[in-house]
Image (cartoon, rainbow, N blue to C red):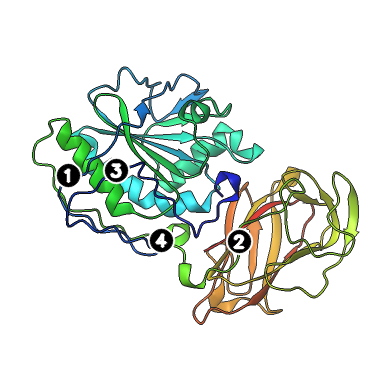
Amino acid sequence: MMKALITAAVSFALLAGAVVAANQTLAEDNNVTQKTTPAAMQLPVEGEFPSLSGATEWLNSKPLTAAELRGKVVLVEFWTYSCVNWRRTLPYVRAWAQKYKDRGLVVIGVHSPEFSFEKNVDYVRREAGKMGVSYPIAIDNDFAVWSAFGNEYWPALYFVDARGRIRHHKFGEGEYDLSESVIQQLLTEAGVKGVAHEVSSVDPNGFEVAADWNDLKSPETYIGYARTENFASPGGLGSDDRREYAIPPLGLNRWALSGDWTAEREFVALGKAGGRIAYRFHARDLNLILGPGAGGSVRFRVFLDGRPPGPAAGVDVNAAGYGTVTEPRMYQLIRQPKPIVDREFEIEFLDPGVAAYDFTFG
């Protein structure tokens, strides 16, 4: 879900020249949080805290400015609510916001939308409430704050010290212990006494569970014609035209449509009930970003290798594979138990009107 098509399995820790104190070890492993010692890190100054004035609206807070936040340690988090990479980071950010809010930390979530439906502030407010995002949210529909930071990724974390200087950043998932150690150090530098060096323990569930990186062999796949890859239906994917599609035999990481679909830049839209999407994948989790269209809800049924998913059903379907698209968001359709092998996924829509945007895996 990161911009520039960086996959969930790659964690970028661009420490920008920071030198870690002696005897500190940073494990480069997306699937294991990194352990750090309490010894101080030499964190460079990466720039000044940019303006937040480009935000079009604020949730959970009055508008905040860089100037009034001087004296506070600030964690600026770029997110978009349908992003699986961000969802897997969220339990840690939520824990830090709660743990350090009385010690001088301010967490700001800058919501910069990837898909058009994410510009709807009511959707952002609803999803933030369901996910427990209670810290201030800057609505960045024009990408003004994004541009002010020179950001390119979801998720992205920027760590600002009490003097208004960016001292560290983290792109993508992982390195949660290191990130929390940076927060602790910046609070200590700000004069906060007795900052504990223990790192937070989280118990994620649903979408927030870390990916099974060892068995993740399928990439994020956009479905609209602007960015899609590996489409297998005969005749290729159209652009802004309505046509009938068929599903051929699929190789790994190939996907296809059957039925009456219109391909648009961001999504494909179903014209008649009975349309299907198929994907041959290798991963524990399969998620699909879906919207209900104008009809308000769309019923569907999921199949795994031609059968109901049973114990491999995701949180948004039952064991028989049935579910309903009621709002535009990410739906977890498959979470399979081990052993993880190549599987063929199909989803059949029992009503017309659905819009399908993006496959993600975990």
Element under disc 1? loop
Question: How far, Cα to Cα, is label 2 from label 4?
Answer: 16 Å
Mark 1 highlights which residue?
40
Mark closer to the observer (2, 1)? 1
The residue shown at (21%, 56%) is 24
Pointer 4 local density, CA inside 10 Å: few below 14, some 14–19, many at least 20: many
Q: Nearer the viewer, residue 203 or 339?
A: 339
Q: Which residue is mark 4?
A: 30
Residue with the most extreme left position: 194
Q: Which residue is mark 2?
A: 219
Write the residue at 74% across / 49% down.
224
Cα gap from disc 1 to disc 4, whole angstroms = 23 Å
Mark 2 vs mark 3: in front: 3
- Which one is earlier in the sequence, the residue at label 2 or at label 1? 1
Q: Amino acid at mark 4?
A: Asn
The answer to whether mark 2 and mark 1 are in CB contact below 8 A is no
Could you tell me which secondary element the residue under label 2 belongs to?
loop
Q: Earlier in the sequence, mark 1 or mark 4?
A: 4
Mark toward the start of the polypeptide (2 vs 3) = 3
| Distance (Cα) linking label 2 and label 1 | 37 Å
Q: Nearer the viewer, mark 3 or mark 4?
A: 3
Q: Amino acid at mark 2?
A: Pro
Q: CA distance from mark 3 to mark 4?
A: 20 Å
